[in-house]
Image (cartoon, rainbow, N blue to C red):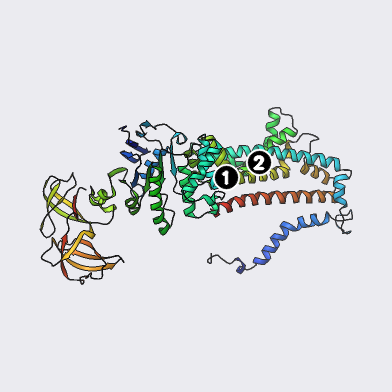
Amino acid sequence: MTSPDIAVAVDRVIKRYGSVTALHGVSLDIRENEFFTLLGPSGCGKTTLLRAIAGFEDVTEGRILLKGQDLTGLPPHKRPVNTVFQQYALFPHMTVTENVMFGLLRKGWSRPEAERRVRDVLHLVQLSDFAARKPGQMSGGQQQRVALARALAPRPEVLLLDEPLSALDLKLRQAVRMELKALQRETGIAFIFVTHDQEEALTMSDRIAVMSAGRVQQVGSPREIYEAPVNRFVADFIGETNLLDVAVQSISAGQANVLLPGNHPFTCPAAAVVEPGAGHLSVRPERISLCPEDQGHLRATVTGHTYLGTDIQLHVVLVDGETMSVRLQNAETTLVPDTGSVIGLKLETGAARLLAD
Amino acid sequence: MAAKVDLRRFPGFLTVTILCLFVLYAPLIVVAVYSFNASSSITNWGGVSLTWYADVFTGPEAPKFQKAALNSLVIAVCAATAATVIATLAAVAMTRAGRFKGKTLGFALINLPLMVPEVVTAVASLVFFSAIGFTTGLMTILIAHIVFCIPFAYLPIAARMQSIPDMFEQAAMDLYATPREAFKLVLLPLMTPGILSGFLLAFIISLDDFLITNFVKGAGVETLPTAIFGSVKQGIKPNIMAISTLMLAVSVVFVSLSWLIGRTGQDKKQAR
């Protein structure tokens, strides 16, 4: 539990608001120097957890440890963590310098030291020329960097980020992702990042905790989360997937023998908790290839296609009436089958995975 | 915006507007204009002069008015200050303490003085002071003024507070500020326009008050409004018009200031 490379340990945390339970016994270990993302739809409890770490919410049960120290009962101003707020919450009556210096002075730094640190941090976020501005005179992207500088200046043990990119427009958001990741590497501290944007989570994180309805569904690297989702929620929330009803015949050593629609036998990896019977097969649409109708794992009728630029999404219906989508790369040689034609679908290795509910 | 009703199309719009403006402002204009009358008549125009303004400061009634004006000023400053402090604390409690038992009741109690007929408050104050054996004088005026100034100070302050999201205090505390420092360094500066606006409003309400003051003032103690009233009882002289015009000017300046300060804060917030 208090292993030396754990920055934040969340230990069976329960949070209730009256009769509503926001967190149902969440346990997580966030490592030192790690970009850790709490990912989930709104209302899944990710922000509540972040606020509990910051000290704005007290937990009903369980505890949160920071480098082995129990934070329970400690008010926000006594916790060595800093937050980048969703709306930045820059003090509008202070200049950029005063904003960034605020935490340093409260923490008891001497003014010359604080001034030096402010210069360094503003340099780090490339805002040296804006030191005397007020937040109201800056763009959204600049304000976001001031918020980052302000939170990083007092050298927090862990940096908390509450959807800090959601107020930026798309282009800027993509650029800032890389900057954030680089900043995390440079500072060498753990970043705990809250988002509902799965693309953001996949591109920036070392590890992701997918949350839903107050519970952690899965923790893993972006690749693990995407390629080996443990349940339907994770498979569906991360990226796009086809979920097929299949009959599970047997499971051994994590491999499942299933009958696909059309009674074609198929072997694929299974999430640990699946039992024989009816199951759900997740098939990523970009891991399916087309073939003549009698040579694939599945037989399907084409019902149409959607042009997406880099890809073409093919809509098909299976013999049992289930619909699927298939992604074809938009290359010069790509042949899009006509609507109404019958084709075979070949599931590539690793394309499919049997899931628990 | 385009869907707004064009009021000017209603029949009689212009007539009603002019009538209302006339009833509201014609008397004020007459008083202001006649305060510059050279003649001592209040009906005949005898040319422009500052005679009556000079009379206010040097004439036979000057010492009486000066004393009354000083009383008014001292009371207005003290009452507005006390009311603003109380109203600020009330506003912090009402907007920051979350939901607590009796919050709605508290809100009603703070604002009730606005609804109670002033003469009732006046009578009640007088009865109260005599019941507890408090000698009427400057002190009773001051206490009564503090009481009725509170809601006037409270309204702009609370309005301002409601527009300040609590994320600023949270950010301050996240950055190692104690709750006290978060209040002093972050919330208070953001509230300042509301507080100033509330103070100015309370100040002008106190300065103008006649009814309650007249009930609770002791014998021989006068504020400017009661002194003017006393003087008018012996016949309207142009020097009263001059004093009234001066008070009008002070009121306009303070109310405008209150409004402008309230607005600058709003603009800054929108620019963010």
Dot 1 crowding, Cα within 10 Å, few <14, some 14–19, many 20+: many
Q: Circle 2 — which element? A: helix
Q: x%, y% of residue B258?
A: 66, 49
**Subunit that carries the residue with mark 2:** B
Dot 2 crowding, Cα within 10 Å, few <14, some 14–19, many 20+: many
Figure check: A61 above or below B196: above
Relative to residue B248, is residue A294 drawn left or right? left
**Subunit that carries the residue with mark 1:** B
Name the residue beneath numbered marker 2.
Answer: B149
Relative to residue A293, is residue A130 drawn left or right? right
Q: x%, y% of residue A294?
A: 10, 65
Relative to residue B209, is residue A108 drawn left or right? left
Instruction: Report, in whole angstroms, how far the alpha carbon at label 1 lies from the one at label 2.
Output: 22 Å
Q: x%, y% of residue A200?
A: 35, 52
Name the residue beneath numbered marker 1.
Answer: B190
**Residue situated in front as seen by the camera: A181 or A83:** A181
C-beta proximity under 8 Å, tags 1 and 2: no
Q: Circle 1 — which element? A: helix
Are marks 1 and 2 in one subunit? yes
